[in-house]
Image (cartoon, rainbow, N blue to C red):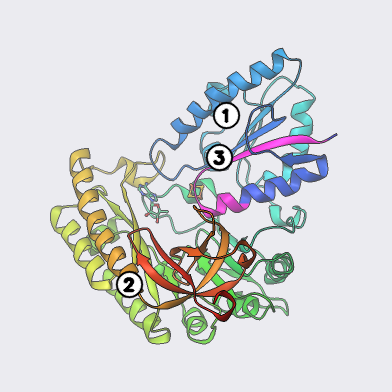
Amino acid sequence: MKKRVFIKTYGCQMNVYDSSRMADCLSPLGFVEAQTPQGADLVILNTCHIREKAAEKVFSELGHLRALKEAKGRRGGEMLIAVGGCVAQAEGAELLRRAPFVDIVFGPQSYHRLPELVARAARKTGEGLLETSFPAEPKFDFLPAPGASAGVSALLSVQEGCDKFCSFCVVPYTRGAEFSRPAGQVLAEARRLVAGGAREITLLGQNVNAYHGKAPQGGEWRLGELLRAVSEIKGLERLRYTTSHPREVDRSLIAAHRDLPKLMPHLHLPAQTGSDRVLALMNRRHSADDYRRIVDRLREARADLALSSDFIVGFPGEEEEDFAATLAFVKEIGFAQAFSFKYSPRPGTPAAAAPRQVPEPQKAERLAALQALIARQQCAFNQSFLGRVLPVLLEKPGRRGGQLLGKSAYLQNVHVTAAAERRGEIAPVLIREAGLKSLGGALFDRASA
Ligand code: 5AD
Ligand code: SF4
């Protein structure tokens, strides 16, 4: 009999990937994915712990789910509730204590054990099950092959975890030590995705350019070599990778940007701050000048490269002059886009206990100033494409009828006037509108004339 599983995903693309792999590993048990939690046999929250109140959001969502579970129970049915991901890893037993109606708590490195956990939970042992060890066996060796229909733009996890211990970051504690999948395994998954219709693949890792996986012929590949091999897959048209660390941009990666036309000219390279003093406090182990040099070398290799980044404001000890250095840095590098966040103390990380925490009003003020600057740059970047023809990957139905939503090489959303059957193509689009968040235009080829 078919059973229904509803998976709600919080956080990063790695979690999006993990959620789809969870569905893959539950499908042999007869689970099909549901779009709502109502009446589901199993609900999984795949949680994120990166910033503020993530755990609180999970507890409030769990409150709603408890009501659904009880309602189903009154009708004689059963709904299992499982909490996975980074909050599960960080909170562990505390989660079961605060929410005793939760059946399973499992970490990001143990979800290949979900089928067994679900079977055990269904047998009603009473206590909630806790699986937050970092197993010796890599989960990838136990997951079934991914479902064939990953969409035209697919995610592929190649590296996980982090040994860098930036002083603000919870990831080394929730995702564990750095680990790279063997290149052969990555290539096999990439081929399968392309055979299933993917035109674009994004290689994922918390520290993706720290990749150092076993090469198919022995030895080790770095990310540059892996990209080279993946780009040779016929039918694949676009290749990306995220998220990178400035310390791991090596010669092979720069060469990949120079040599591989399929590697998109867009790089997300978190800088966090433009101040050397704060970079040191953050334990980033590079300077602002190191970052500038990397950008110069990348732009030499690929002149049309656009950069996006992440910034944290109000890190403990950040002074006005440090923040001014960040603003100057954002202008100088000319980021096309960036995400910025108020520093949020994460339990157990060194910076959470650091003296000189920045008061909330100052954090808010700095965030507003930085976001205004970034928005101006992003808008100018988008407007620079007005009147130009861009290749756009037509991904899904658009907001209005007769429209498709696509992505430019620079990851801009593009609303395109196009017939539904053009979906999945990379088509030339004449850009006629450009705002902060998206571009708009119409197909510009013979088929559309
Ligand atoms: N507070 C605020 N932002 C954070 N990030 C990571 N940890 C924190 C934190 N404790 C941001 C960083 C990172 C992005 C994914 O999230 O900018 O690059
Ligand atoms: Fe959130 Fe980081 Fe975990 Fe992704 S890896 S879910 S961003 S805490």
Of residues 314 and 77, the one nearer the viewer is 77
- Cβ at disc 1 under 8 Å from ligand 2: no
The picture places residue 240, in percent across and down from the top left corner, at 53, 70
Outermost residue to the left: 321
**In the shown orientation, is residue 196 left or right of residue 405?**
right
Quadrant hosting residue 385 = bottom left
Residue on which the image places disc 3: 89
**In the shown orientation, is residue 190 left or right of residue 16?**
right
Q: Nearer the viewer, mark 2 or mark 1?
A: 2
Q: Is residue 144 above or below residue 71?
A: below
The picture places residue 103, in percent across and down from the top left corner, at 66, 27
Three-letter amino acid code of the residue under disc 3: Gln
Quadrant hosting residue 165 = bottom left
Q: Is residue 222 visible?
A: no
Please state, as top left, top right, bottom left or bottom right, where the N terminus lies in the image.
Answer: top right
**Cα gap from disc 2 to disc 1, whole angstroms:** 41 Å
Three-letter amino acid code of the residue under disc 2: Tyr
Q: Residue at 71%, 57% (x, y): give it.
A: 149
The picture places residue 344, in percent across and down from the top left corner, at 34, 43
Three-letter amino acid code of the residue under disc 1: Ala
Quadrant hosting residue 220 = bottom right
Residue on which the image places disc 1: 93
Residue on which the image places disc 2: 291
Q: Earlier in the sequence, mark 2 or mark 1?
A: 1
Q: Which residues are magenta?
A: 2-17
